[in-house]
Amino acid sequence: MPDSKADSGALPRVARMQIGIIGLGRMGGNITRRLLADDHDCVVYDTNPVTVDALTTDGATGAESLRDLVRQLVPPRFVWVMLPAGAVTEDVVTALGAALSPGDTIIDGGNSFYRDDIRRAKTLKAGGVNYLDVGTSGGIWGLERGYCLMVGGDPEAVAALDSILRSLAPGLGEIPRTGRPDDADPRPELGYVHAGPVGAGHFVKMIHNGIEYGLMQAYAEGFDILRGKGSPILPQDEQFDLNLADIAESWRRGSVVSSWLLDLAAQALAKNPDLEGFSGSVSDSGEGRWAVEAAIEEAVPANLLATALFARFRSRERHTFGEKLLSAMRFGFGGHVEPGSKK
């Protein structure tokens, strides 16, 4: 567990809380372990009993069903849902809404669409159940590094969960402070922000992921150009056999393009310079698409984010029908043949 937990500004040490956690995959499991390490009481459930057993070994209390999890929690209850966006999360939130009592709180820590959050919160409010949406960034490194959290919901409900959020967040760490005003909210410096009302947390995370797409695409294209400088199509005296691992390593230190993503790229190149075993087919999650849709709705130019998203689509195709049509048109008007073609 990171030492940054001990250095969390002027706030007192976190108070122990009880929380239920549903969904114990890589993110949900490590979120549970980080909370257990900070002495919280975690009641856990997953449809895969193996994951439940693994976490009970680590100190959590296992549940056999959603209702069993609710039964083991002391009111007011807090239940963190860490499942893929879509039908599975919708079904679990609906079931919890029927099982919980007024004053209880459901937290969706996954990547749901922010408009779904707004709709769910209105439905749950009729029964007196609170709803928070928490955009969670940190991936598989969150157990050690902590999670950056973007929270949407009523201020009172967010404040009630503060001990959990502080335990999950990285804390001040060693990042230089930015000279914020004395009366500024202390939470963002610790790695979590109350972004606004319900839906704002996942909306901010949605844009965060769109930016992530753009950053990753910029690195990918830049290193592709560096690698291509050794191409035989260039004049011989302009062909450079560049060591990409060494370049990435040097950029990590003092360069304006240094970042954690660059750290990960440098690690990958150091271990596997030719990236053998990677096909280059890159998936996209819903957030990147939703970010571009939001830009369209707001009439905000988002050239890079849209291009990065489309590049992921392209990565999954060997050659698209459209590219075949381009080639056919070039052959038709100019007799241009494809490389390696026998036409």
Image (spheres, rainbow, N blue to C red):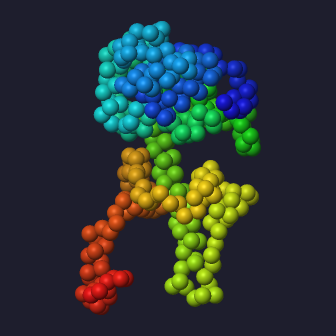
Q: Residue at x 58, y 88 (%)?
A: 235
For residue 97, what is the image quadrant?
top left
Q: Nearer the viewer, residue 20 or 149?
A: 20
Q: Which residue is drawn at 53% across and 25% down?
A: 32
Total tally of numbered discs in the picture: 0
Q: Nearer the viewer, residue 273 or 214?
A: 273
For residue 166, what is the image quadrant?
top right
Residue 84, position as x, y percentages in the image = 38, 36
Residue 24, position as x, y percentages in the image = 45, 28
- Quadrant assignment for the N terminus: top right
- Quadrant assignment for the C terminus: bottom left
Q: Which residue is drawn at 36% across and 17% down?
A: 65
Task: Tell me: 57 left or right of 101.
Answer: right
Residue 228 in sight here: yes
Q: In this view, does 330 lie above or below 302?
A: below
Q: In this view, does 90 lie above or below 301?
A: above
